[in-house]
Amino acid sequence: MWTFLSFRIRDFILFGLIAAVAATIRMSKKWHEAELGRQKAELKRIEAELKNLHNQINPHFLLNTLNNIYALIAFDADKAQQAVQDLSRLLRHLLYDNNQDFIPLDRELEFLKNYVALMKIRLSPNVDLQFHIDIPSENPIRVAPLIFISLFENAFKHGISPVKPSFIHIKIYSSGPDALSCSIENSYFPKQRNDISGSGIGLEQVQKRLDLIYPGKYEWTKGCDENATVYKSTITIHTTTK
């Protein structure tokens, strides 16, 4: 009798263990499926937010550029024609490169050089504009398109005075094997609240894009000096070569 009972007890324990393991496997599978669903939903949310940010960049950038060309027409038609040609090159970049997740760094640098050339047309002699690029030739770095353009716009918006000496110093350089830095330092003339020239998404939009595209892979320092006369912003991102 005791032998029979011991076998029964053993069978009952084994059955319980098997049932527990099976239940654990089922729960683990359900949790895994739920986690995959959550990750897919999060990915779709991020993609939708990035798309929305891209849609905001284009009209914001184009409105600022068109305003600059409109101002040029009034006092220098030849420069305005040159500006239209420069704008056509910028539009080519916006139409074909902005829809990609990452593009070769060379193409993005060419876009930024064209943008600076377009902005330079309107500058008076009292503005010291410097733009330096220190990147190894034939580099394999790929970068999110238009990731720095709002910083450039911000410098031209707040860094120039129509009557006082001003400066904008920009440098893009390789700060490591897979690190890209953009440093902008400019004189600081904050706009009044009722001045909407160049208004748009600005630095908040830059922050959102960095968080979505380079989470945990960037550093950004920004702010004015102690006299609130100079503004400096430096972004370093750890890029991709794929």
Image (cartoon, helix red, strand yellow):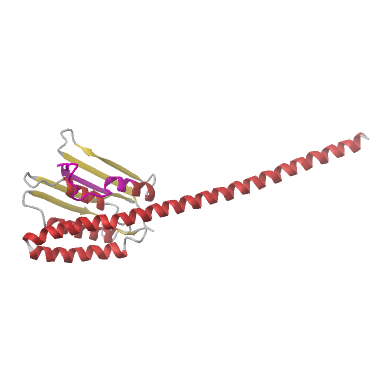
Q: Residue furthest right?
A: 1
State the image quarter where residue 164 is shown.
Answer: top left
Q: Residue 18: x and y, percent?
A: 74, 44
Magenta stretch encompasses residue 56: no
Report if residue 144 is visible in the image: no
Q: Quadrant of residue 52?
A: bottom left
Q: Quadrant of the C terminus?
A: bottom left
Q: Is residue 240 above or below residue 31?
A: below
At x 37% / y 53%, what residue is drawn? 50
Q: Position of residue 161 (x, y in %)?
A: 10, 46
Task: Pinpoint residue 162: horizontal percent, then vertical percent.
Answer: 8, 47
How many labels, in total?
0
Asked whether the viewer can see residue 160, the reply is yes
Residue reaching furthest to the front: 194
In the image shown, does 5 or 24 lie closer to the viewer? 24
Task: State the residue at coordinates (58%, 48%).
Answer: 32
Q: Is residue 199 magenta?
A: yes
Q: Is residue 89 above or below residue 132?
A: below
In the rendered structure, the answer to whether residue 78 lies left or right of residue 113 reads: left
Quadrant of the snapshot with the N terminus: top right
- The segment highlighted magenta reads 181-207
Name the foreground residue: 95 vs 14: 95
| Left or right of residue 205: residue 17 | right
Q: Residue at x 23, y 62 (%)?
A: 90
Task: Return the x and y of residue 42 as percentages of the image width and height.
Answer: 47, 50
Q: Nearer the viewer, residue 83 or 129?
A: 83
